[in-house]
């Protein structure tokens, strides 16, 4: 049976054969192309994936090495530098603002303290009638300036016109007033004015104003002491400067919990003085009265505790207000009590008597003739007042303030021995008080003193040399305390709020210059000056007071003395039975209150001392004592003296004695 074949099978075979031939030709052609390529092309194509891998790894390794190197550089090489740079932003260095320590008197009354004050600046362009207005017309600007000026004028004590003129000056920032007190600052701040700028400062404030200025002094705008204890005790008044570090935020704010309590704490210590403000006020009042009454140039009062040298009061008039020191004459900044020299006159006579007694040159019972004049070399010395010739005891010489008697007393000593005693008392030196700018006393050279008899003669009644008031007080304190030379001082030390001492000055040991027997004798003689002599105007009933007057013509810098210029003084010691207080009053150039009135220490200076002693009696509640008076012949003459007139001929010949 013939096979059955689909009709199309022959055609399909032809198509498959044709397709196979095309595939065969394509494969042959493809092989020929491959066979024509070089061998290197084939190897490069096969190594592409490896090359790419190497590049990637190389980049990664290089980056890692770079990072490691940079990390080493940052962490090791530049570590210290970068740490410092970071600390500039992370660490805040703090320096404590330490207020100056206050100054108080012996009873803790404040004499100087720091107060917060404010400087007020204004920006007129920022003044607004209402804070709700974003923009305002020129008319509104004028009204705003007038409004601010009207509010500020009474509070800053400036005229309305003056403030408006400043506001219209065109300046963007204007200083209105410095050192505005806290209460005024609060009053202005409550007004909610725009355009105000406050600058807080600490200012030194002196509540007693001029009363203690000569002792306390003042500080300048740099807060540096320029006078008084503000200058001499600068280190004690400045609190130790504290510094610390704290962390801060990025905008500069301090993280408060990182600041130690020790840094924030300010000690409560204060500088305490020996002054008694009550006594200072009494002395100032009494002195001002006499200065005004006699139209005097100036005056000084010193009150000292003779036992240890503590100064209880020191007043100079005229004075200045340390709160506004810049308004005062610079000459007022000098404390006359220790910076200026003068001839003490008759107030030095008791010290000369003590020298003569101590050296046994005289006895307390010796008497001397007083004819009213005495020849010394080619000079004639007279008494200030012409009295009847008399035979005088030592006590009477002091009572009458006899120059002639004192010359004879000191002629019992050899000039060289007398000079050595003056040096032993400290003449030619300073006393070492703890206040600045103390002057040294002046005395002639030993050769001049010994060679010319007139020198020892005039020195016997307090002329020819010069001392400070504070040195005269120191010397009279030696007569009061049994012969010891103590160091005058005003500083007690640093004390805390509970009264516990932190630092106290070390004073030199007292130096014995006279025996207690000598000083007791001289003190009793000085008591008769008050009860029977020239110092009777200082007498207080029921209380034993010793004293000595002094009235000396002022020495001229050109030589000789001024004819009508006097320094009057009185020194008192109380109570005689148990001496404690030495009070000196000195009045410079008092003038007669009426025509023909004479100027004496007894009429000008002694009443000041009496007023001060009255205040002491009241303050200390001192009971009266029965006054003991030495039996001495009474004088028929008025008990006044003027030692400066005694050496008339010497002055006329122009002896060069500097004040």
Image: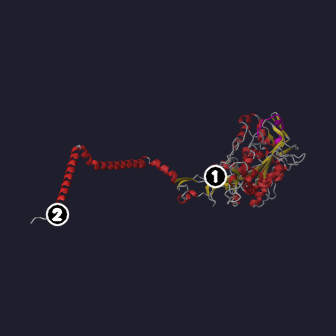
The magenta span reads 644-659
Seen from the viewer's position, the closer of residues 114 and 543 is 114
Seen from the viewer's position, the closer of residues 346 and 145 is 145
Check disc 1 and report the residue beneath it.
237
Check disc 2 and report the residue beneath it.
6
Residue lying at the far right of the rendered structure: 595
- Alpha-carbon span between mark 1 and mark 2: 134 Å
Q: What is the quadrant of residue 627 in the picture?
A: bottom right
Q: Say which element carries label 1.
A: helix
Task: Tally the marks.
Answer: 2
User: Residue 101, image x and y in percent?
Assistant: 64, 54
User: Residue 656, image x and y in percent?
Assistant: 77, 35
Quarter of the image that includes the C terminus = top right
Q: Say which element carries label 2.
A: loop
Mark 1: few, some, or many residues within 10 Å (few <14, many ≥20)?
many
Quarter of the image that includes the N terminus = bottom left
Asked whether the viewer can see residue 587, the reply is no
């Amino acid at each position: 049976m013939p096979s059955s074949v689909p009709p199309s099978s022959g055609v399909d075979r032809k198509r498959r054969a044709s397709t196979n031939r095309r595939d065969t030709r394509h494969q042959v052609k493809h092989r020929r192309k491959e066979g024509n390529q070089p061998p290197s092309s084939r190897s490069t194509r096969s190594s592409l994936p490896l090359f790419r891998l190497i590049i990637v790894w190389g980049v990664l390794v290089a980056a890692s090495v770079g990072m490691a190197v940079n990390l080493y550089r940052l962490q090791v090489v530049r570590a210290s530098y970068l740490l410092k740079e970071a600390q500039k932003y992370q660490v805040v260095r703090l320096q404590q603002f330490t207020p100056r320590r206050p100054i108080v008197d012996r009873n803790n009354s404040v004499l100087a303290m720091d107060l917060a004050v404010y400087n007020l600046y204004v920006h007129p362009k920022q003044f607004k009638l209402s804070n709700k207005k974003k923009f305002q017309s020129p008319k509104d600007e004028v009204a705003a300036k007038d409004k601010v000026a009207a509010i500020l004028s009474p509070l800053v004590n400036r005229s309305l016109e003056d403030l408006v003129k400043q506001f219209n000056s065109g300046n963007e920032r204007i200083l209105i007033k410095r050192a505005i007190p806290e209460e005024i600052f609060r009053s202005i701040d409550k007004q909610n004015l725009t355009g105000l700028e406050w600058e807080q400062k600490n200012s030194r404030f002196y509540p007693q104003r001029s009363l203690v200025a000569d002792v306390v002094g003042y500080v300048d705008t740099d807060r540096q002491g320029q006078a008084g204890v503000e200058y001499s005790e600068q280190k004690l008044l400045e609190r130790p400067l504290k510094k610390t570090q704290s962390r801060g935020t990025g905008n500069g704010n301090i993280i408060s919990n990182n600041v130690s309590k020790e840094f924030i704490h300010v000690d409560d210590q204060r500088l305490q003085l020996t002054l008694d403000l009550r006594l200072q006020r009494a002395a100032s009042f009494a002195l001002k009265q006499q200065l005004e009454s006699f139209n005097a140039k100036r005056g000084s009062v010193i009150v000292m505790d003779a036992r240890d040298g503590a100064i209880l009061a020191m007043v100079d008039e005229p004075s200045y207000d340390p709160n506004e020191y810049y308004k005062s004459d610079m000459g007022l900044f000098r404390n006359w009590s220790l910076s200026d020299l003068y001839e003490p006159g008759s107030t030095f006579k008791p010290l000369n008597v003590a020298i003569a007694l101590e050296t046994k040159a005289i006895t307390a019972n010796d008497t001397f003739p007083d004819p009213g004049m005495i020849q010394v070399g080619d000079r004639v010395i007279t008494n200030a007042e012409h009295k009847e010739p008399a035979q005088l005891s030592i006590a009477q010489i002091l009572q009458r303030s006899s120059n002639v008697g004192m010359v004879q007393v000191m002629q019992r000593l050899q000039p060289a021995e007398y000079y050595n005693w003056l040096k032993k008392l400290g003449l030619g030196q300073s006393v070492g008080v703890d206040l600045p700018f103390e002057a040294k006393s002046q005395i002639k050279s030993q050769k001049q003193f010994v060679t010319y008899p007139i020198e020892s003669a005039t020195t016997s009644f307090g002329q020819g040399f010069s001392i400070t008031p504070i040195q005269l007080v120191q010397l009279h304190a030696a007569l009061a305390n049994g012969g010891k030379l103590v160091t005058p001082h005003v500083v007690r030390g640093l004390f805390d709020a509970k009264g516990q001492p932190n630092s106290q000055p070390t004073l030199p040991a007292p130096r014995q210059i006279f025996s207690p027997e000598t000083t007791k004798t001289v003190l009793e003689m000085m008591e008769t000056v008050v009860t029977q002599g020239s110092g009777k105007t200082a007498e207080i009933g029921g209380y034993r007071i010793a004293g000595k007057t002094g009235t000396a013509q002022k020495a001229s810098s050109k030589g000789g003395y001024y004819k009508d210029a006097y320094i009057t003084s009185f020194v008192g010691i109380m109570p005689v039975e148990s001496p404690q207080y030495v009070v000196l009053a000195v009045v410079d150039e008092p003038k007669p209150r009426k025509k023909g009135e004479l100027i004496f220490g007894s009429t000008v200076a002694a009443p000041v001392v009496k007023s001060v002693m009255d205040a002491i009696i009241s303050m200390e509640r001192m009971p009266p004592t029965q006054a003991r008076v030495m039996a001495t012949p009474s004088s028929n003459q008025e008990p006044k003296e003027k030692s400066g007139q005694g050496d008339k001929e010497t002055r006329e010949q122009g002896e060069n004695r500097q004040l």
